[in-house]
Structures are given as C-alpha cells and as structure tokens.
Image (spheres, rainbow, N blue to C red):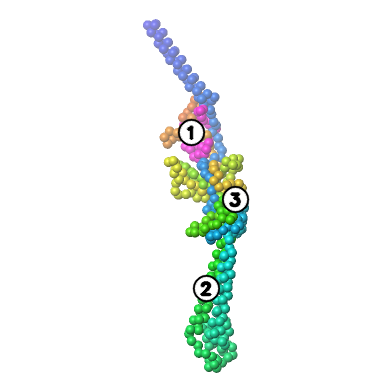
Amino acid sequence: MKKIIIVLFSIIAISAAIALATTLLFRAKTKPGSSYETITVKKKNIGASILATGSVKPIIGAEVKVGARIPGKVTHLYANIGDKVEKGQIIAEIEKEDLKAQVAQAENNLKAAEANVGVSKAAFWPALSAETDYGAQGPSYFPQQGQNFAGLKATMPLFNGQDLYTIKQSKATKEAAKAALDFTKVQLSYATITAPISGVISFVSTQQGETVAAGLIAPICVTIIDLTKLQVDAFVDETDIGRVKEGQKVIFTVDTYPEKEFTGKVRTIYPKAVIHENVVNFDVVIEVTDPEIELLRPDMTTSVTIYQEEKKGALTIPRMALTKEGNSRFVFVMKKDGSLEKRAVKIGILNGSNVEIVSGLNEGETVAIKKE
C-alpha cells in the first residue's frame, strides 16, 4: 500500500513539474525580445494610396510631325534635333522659282480679265461709264445724270440681250482669274514650312538638298514636341482600379531625379484594360501639375503614388500585426502577464505600411508582431 501511495505522489509531482515547465516555456516565447516584438497602438494621420508604374507621354496635340505638302528639293533646312522653335517659325524651305512664275502668270491673267470687263462695258453703251451696268440700273440711270433717255435712245445703236451676257461672261472670267491667283499663292506658301506649335525639335528625317515627293501622305520633315504638355500613363492593377477617381492627388518620381517628387492629378481612366502576360491593368492618365515639368522627357519610367482619402487622428497599427483568417482579421494583444490574446478587429484605411483600426483595440494597448 505504501508503495502505491509513493508511486501516486511521484506521478503527481512529475505532472506538476511538466506543467510548470510548459507554462514557463510558453511565457518565454511570448516575451518581447524572444520571437515577438511589441508595438503600442497609437493615433496618427493615415492616408490610403495606390502604387503603380508608368511612363511619361506627350498629351494629344503636343507632338506634331511636320511634313511637306508639295514635291521639290529642300533648299534650306533651319532645324536641328534639340533646337527650340516658336509657333510660325520657318524650319524649312522648298524650291519655289516655278511657283513664283505661276503666281506672276496668274496676276497677269487677272489684269487681262479686268481689262476685258471694261472693254465689254464700253462696247455695250458708250454713253455709260465703264463701271455702270445697264442690267442693274436700266433707264433710271439717265434721269440721275440729267439726260434725256428718249433722245439718247434715238441716236444710240439698238440694244440686244447678247451684250448683257458678254458683260457677265467677262466678269466671270475675272473671278476665275482671281481664284486661280489665290490658288497659286497658296501653293507658293506650301514651299515655306513653318512650325505649327512651339516646342523642341525631336526628330529630323529630311536633309538639305534632298528631294521630297508629296503624295497621298505628306513626307515627314521634322517632329516637334511641346515639353510643357506632358502626361503620365500609369498602369493600375485591376484589384485597385475601383478606388481610383478623377481629381485624386498624385506624386511620382523618375529614375533621372530620384530625390525629386513631381506632382499631378488623375485626369481620366481608360475604359479598356491592358493585358500583358495574363496580368490585367488599366491605363490611368495623370495630368502633370508640377511647375518643373520641363525636367521630364517622353518615355521616362515613373513610380506613381495615387493618394485617396486621408483621416486625421486615426487609431493605427502596422499592417504586419494583422492576421487574416477567411474574411476576418485578428491581432495578438499582449496582456499584463506576458501572454498573448487573439482578438478580432475591424479595419479601415490601408496604406503601404499601416492600417486603421475601427474597432477591437484601444489606444495604448500593445500588439505583438512575430519576428521574421
């Protein structure tokens, strides 16, 4: 009997020792400085944002390809890559001697047509001045001049309808000659190529002395880019595109100026997705509002941050402190005795490193983050 009692006491003592060792081991694991670190729940300002990559592009109308509208040899080229040009500035000239001769011929044709109108009027009625049209004023012209129409009628040749049509025909010939002169002047103007916008020459495809042949498509001579009219095309993942709205503030950087943050705002969102290697993104067009926009160049790679809502004095913890199980989120709260309590929380705004806690925690409580 004594032996049985001794065995029972031994079993109880061993069990108590094992329980005590297990408790101490668990507490040791939950103490700061072992496998966990602790963070105090605090209030601070938090804002949600979306990260994306993109590139700098000219806006529509900011990049213009200038070409020749008539064929001919380029006699002068005043553009080099990198040159700044103003709107209306001459950048190239095409041989124009033949066009000048056509203009001179058209001017002489117009003078001849004008003279022919005067001859036809004078032949129609000598008593009338060259600028008087019987068809417009008729017999009412003579009383205004104090003359006797009946007496003049008796002494002048008989009038017939052909004379009136002769005058109209000469006038039509004059108008046709004037139109032909205007056309040749327009053709002559095409020989002088001017900049349609102000900007920088980014490409030159024609050299002085070359002959251009204008057909259905005008040959490109130079390309001009207005560096004050640029945008950023950012590619936002489909999981985030629902949170992007027009007018949201944007900060972006480029590799050339890593310490410089450029400002902008969301202008529009393309409705059609861009799919690359089974990854679905949406093109978000960002208007550049930074005053130093001329530091940018087309096709620069950008790192974009799109800011959404911002809340002041929100209860926040690091995102690493969250544990997700299904649709629920939990944190491990450090109790006074050093043990951990698993607690469900409701979250609000998420950003790159922090999360807003709407309910489940109080300011000043301590949450545990497992060390990596």
First in residue order: circle 3 vs circle 1: 3
- The spot of residue 143 in percent (x, y) is 56, 89
Residue 194 appears anywhere in the view: no
Q: Helix, strand, or loop for circle 3? A: loop
- The spot of residue 233 in percent (x, y) is 51, 47
Q: Name the residue type under label 3.
A: Ile
Q: Helix, strand, or loop for circle 2? A: helix
Task: Tell me, yes or no, whether the highlighted magenta stretch contains residue 86.
Answer: no
- The quarter of the picture where residue 152 lies is bottom right
Cα–Cα span, label 2 and label 3: 44 Å
Residue 115 appears anywhere in the view: yes
Cα–Cα span, label 3 and label 1: 55 Å
The 10 Å Cα crowd at callout 2, few under 14, some 14 to 19, many 20 or more, is some
Q: Which residue: 53% across, 31% down?
A: 365
Cα–Cα span, label 2 and label 1: 85 Å
Residue corresponding to mark 2: 176
Residue corresponding to mark 3: 81
First in residue order: circle 2 vs circle 3: 3
Q: Which sits in the foreground, 298 or 331?
A: 298
First in residue order: circle 2 vs circle 1: 2
Q: Which residues are magenta?
A: 343-372
